[in-house]
Amino acid sequence: EVVAADALQGQRWTDAVGVLEKLRERHQELTEQEPGEIESERELARTHLLLGSARFMDGHPAEAVGPLTQAVAAYRVIAELDPDDEEALNGEANAQGLLAGCA
């Protein structure tokens, strides 16, 4: 996760995408092992959002649509588990905003 953060901060989008795809696989596995566990859901949602953001910023908005759509869905799951979760509300709004830019 530190490598992904460094790549994102350095605006090395291609590097970030590669790392984030691996993180997404790991977080997806954890979420499947522990369905409904809110912290696993949060990590997966964040990873989808970051992956979609990196693809968008790298000039590939069409490739950003899938991860951003998954981020919206993941943040909605979190909001169902905890309706007061501000990260879920903000994350979904951020993903929706980026999706609008992909159109």
Image (cartoon, rainbow, N blue to C red):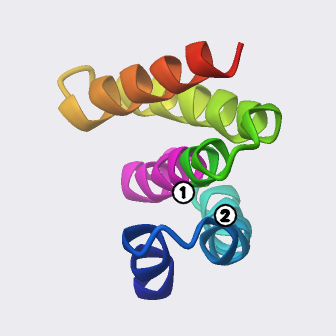
SS under mark 2 = helix
At x 71%, y 39%, the residue is: 64
Residue located farthest toward the right when viewing the structure as drawn: 62
Question: Which type of secondary structure does the marked residue at label 1 adopt?
Answer: helix
Residue for point 41% across, 50% down:
42
The segment highlighted magenta reads 35-50
Q: Is residue 48 left or right of residue 66?
A: left
> Which residue sits at x=54%, y=57%?
47
User: Mark 1 sits on what residue?
Assistant: 47
The answer to whether marks 2 and 1 mark residues whose Cβ atoms lie closer than 8 Å is: yes
- Say few, some or many: other residues with alpha carbon within 10 Å of mark 1 (under 14 / 14 to 19 / 20 or more): many
> Does 46 lie within the magenta span?
yes
Q: In the displayed structure, would residue 96 be above or below residue 70?
A: above
Percent position (x, y) of residue 25? 74, 68
- Please provide percent x and percent y for residue 7: 49, 77
The residue carrying mark 2 is 24
Q: In this view, does 1 lie above or below 16?
A: below
Q: Can residue 80 be seen in this view?
A: no
Left or right: 49, with 21 as reference point: left
| Whether residue 67 is situated above or below residue 12 in the rendered picture | above
Image quadrant of residue 91? top left
Among the two numbered marks 2 and 1 on one chain, the one whose residue lies closer to the N terminus: 2
Q: How crowded is mark 2: few (under 14 residues within 10 Å), some or many (20 or more)?
A: many
Was residue 47 drawn as part of the magenta stretch in this picture? yes
Q: Where is residue 90 in the image (x, y as percent from the top left)?
A: 28, 28
In three-dimensional space, the C-alpha distance between marks 2 and 1, rounded to whole angstroms, equals 6 Å
From the image, give the main secondary structure of the stretch colored magenta: helix
**x, y percent for residue 98:** 53, 26
Three-letter code for the amino acid on which mark 1 is drawn: Thr
Residue type at the position of mark 2:
Arg
